[in-house]
Image: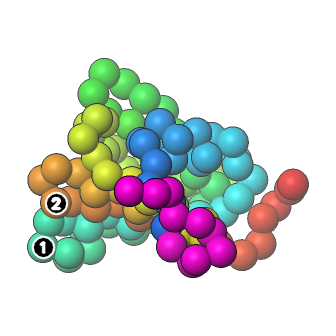
Amino acid sequence: MTTPDWRDGQPLEEDLPVVLGLIADSPNQPRRARLLDAAGEERARLSGLLTWEEGEGWVRLVADQGDGLSASLTIPLDPDARCAIEPDGTMTCTLPSGATWITTPLPGARDS
């Protein structure tokens, strides 16, 4: 299997640490994070500047609105998670259970 080329408009398959690294490396990029269960039903959604913190066996995505409000999603760190990055910056990770979390860039980055 060859790595998809961005010119083909196909997503790039990446490991979970790469996806988390992209979030960490772009702290000024507002994003929307969605959590879907194995049936595809949305269970949570948050928007803002995403940061992440890691514990033993989990990662927590925290969205800060910049006005003192924040919300978080806690996701199990699973080495078998399948992740992909779309050309538009959308990142999707699917856990072995079938649950999925998706981050999408939002317009209006605060700083470069």
Q: From where the camera sits, is residue 47 visible?
A: no
Instruction: Judge the density around disc 2: few (<14), some (14-19), many (≥20) Cα neighbours within 10 Å.
Output: some
Q: What SS does tag 2 mark?
A: loop
Q: Main secondary structure of the magenta part?
A: loop
Q: What SS does tag 1 mark?
A: loop
Report which residue position mark 1 lands on: 39
Mark 2 and mark 1 residues within 8 Å of each other at the beta carbon: yes
- As drawn, the residue found furthest toward the right would be 112
| Along the viewing direction, whichever of 10 and 21 lies nearer the viewer | 10
Q: Residue at x 58, y 39 (%)?
A: 21
Residue 98 marker: 2
Residue 36 image position (x, y, % from top left): 26, 67
Q: Residue at x 51, y 47 (%)?
A: 19
Rendered view: 8 above or below 33: below
In the picture, which quadrant includes the C terminus? bottom right
> The disc labelled 2 sits on which kind of residue?
Gly
Residue 73 image position (x, y, % from top left): 37, 50
Q: Which residues are magenta?
A: 1-10
Residue 100 image position (x, y, % from top left): 28, 61
> The disc labelled 1 sits on which kind of residue?
Ala
